[in-house]
Image (cartoon, coloured by chain):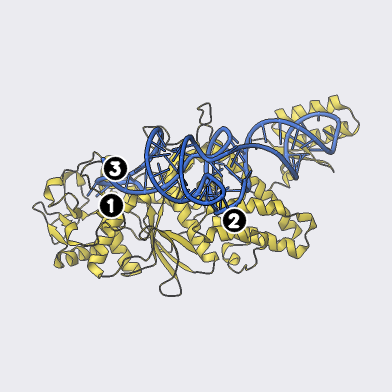
Chain colours: A yellow, B blue
Amino acid sequence: MRLFDTMSREVKDLQSSDGKTFRFYCCGPTVYGPAHIGNFRTFVLQDVFRRTLELSGMPTYHVRNLTDVDDKTIRDAEAAGKTLKEFTDFWRDRFHDDCNQLNNLEPHLEPSAVEHIPHQIAMIEELMEKGHAYRSDDGSVYYKVSSFEGYGRLSRLDQRELRAGASGAVSDDEYEKDSVSDFALWKSRREDDGENYWSSPWGEGRPGWHLECSAMCREYLGDSFDLHSGGVDLVFPHHENEIAQSEACSGHSMADHWFHLTHLLVDGGKMSKSAGNFYTLTQLVEAGFSPAELRYVLISAHYRQPLNFVAKDKDGKESFPALAGAGQALQKIAKFAHVLKQQGKVDTPVGFDALKDVTDLGSFAAAFDGLLDDLNTPDALGQVFSAMKGIKPDELSEVEARREFMGLSVIMGALGLKLPVVEEKVKAEVPAGIAEMAQARWQAKQDKDWGEADRLRDELADAGWEIKDTKEGYELCPKN
RNA sequence: GGCGAGGUAGCCAAGUGGUAAGGCCGGGCUCUGCAAAAGCUCUAUCGCGGGUUCGAUUCCCGCCCUCGCCUCCA
């Protein structure tokens, strides 16, 4: 598999350094509120990445952290009158629930920052010994950016002018630092931290944000591992700082590959609460859309391109046309898969692990190639529809149909798309009165009593049932 | 101000030095008593102006416009 690497700025082949398992780290969520759909663009694409690797025959080891201590978690836990743990556990569970709904595989390991404070303290001590960190008067510890030669390589900071406070945010610890670009490894205890502080050789306080990832990567993946991933916003300063911390300690290159995901835009702009375009999975589900539909939308653009999530239609109404379209597209695939499945007489469910044994993807090989080439999900999706167009299911033998079905299943497995269930046995759940009415209408139709037939059809529609005539008979579907 | 991404049909979005995938919507056709469903099908000279080239949407230069980031936001 080939993937763009932020460090070298080129598409590179992915290789497992130990020759057996591809070991990678993803920066996880800060659990202080519901994750929004932009967050999930990142987590879903990382999941597609992992699924593709595994289906290509490369086992993975996926570590994703939870940030459960920082300014926001502490602030909001205090405001909610809860302990930090109660507060972050709640939002962690919510996050997991969303991930499950979106069909993301669980990381193999999900360490949290609070559980690794000793590891972080040990790392700070090592950095101080090696001359990369200093303690300020208030008991905080900062990383001395000027002490690390490679600083700025990832974000090309060396080629640009660092403008202090350009974002408008100037923290109050500004004058404790030797240089504006130095960042906190340890933050001394403040009054509004409440009970959320830990003791350290430098006094009470808590770890800085960047440090947790360095410490946990080191603990679980070692000094060097295969790939590190996160949203583009993390390139600077977060990942730049992680590199400075980790490499200053170990003397080794931290990760062979840096995989960054571009942000989701909503109606052409950044998502924000004040703009009224801040969406969570729960909200969209409440609006009547499925997690699979959201997932489809999130993978419909290449991960290095900004993706414009259309929430409002041309009239400015919040009708989520993108999700509605995704629903249609998924239905189309689901129906096709259903036909192939029947034609191929596949009667057992095929799980993700079973897909790893599939070697012949039939007409869907091109779609998988798209994924292997820099994780081109929109191309893969396009190839799926193109392949479908070229297949005439009823002309296939059972073996051929089964092969195509398995090929399509591999692609859906790689994309993590759970297809909607194709309704075929709805009749069983139809209330007796409705079924009678439908039968009467069918009879009227056979008798060419159009007036009566239409009247009954309208009546059924009022009762919430839709008639779909076929060659042999008719189907009843609940209207939604 | 700096850095980065981008402008492809009504919308979303791939891709390529030799006249452009796919999805949604919409139109047409088939089927049908009509409709729905289903199936088939149609819709773009790729922001603007130069240049290189036999040939550019694809390379180079300039311009216009959009978006993101610039210390804790995926």
Mark 2 Cα-neighbour bin, 10 Å: few <14, some 14–19, many ≥20 = many
Quadrant (top left, top right, bottom left, bottom right) of the C terminus of chain A: top right
Q: Residue furthest left?
A: A137
Say what amino acid the circle numbered 2 marks. Met
SS category of the residue bearing label 3 = helix
Expressed as whole percent of the image width and height from the top left, the position of residue B10 reads 56, 32
> Badge 1 local density, few (<14 within 10 Å), some, or many (20+)?
some
Task: Please state which amino acid type lies under the numbered disc 3.
Answer: Asp
Label 1 and label 3: CA atoms lie apart by 24 Å
Classify A224 as above or below A437: below
Q: Which numbered disc covers residue A412?
A: 2
Local secondary structure at mark 1: helix
Q: Is residue A254 left or right of residue A474?
A: left
Which residue corresponds to mark 1? A237
SS at circle 2: helix
Of callouts 1 and 3, which one flags the residue occurring earlier in the amino acid sequence? 3
Indicate the chain on which mark 2 is placed: A
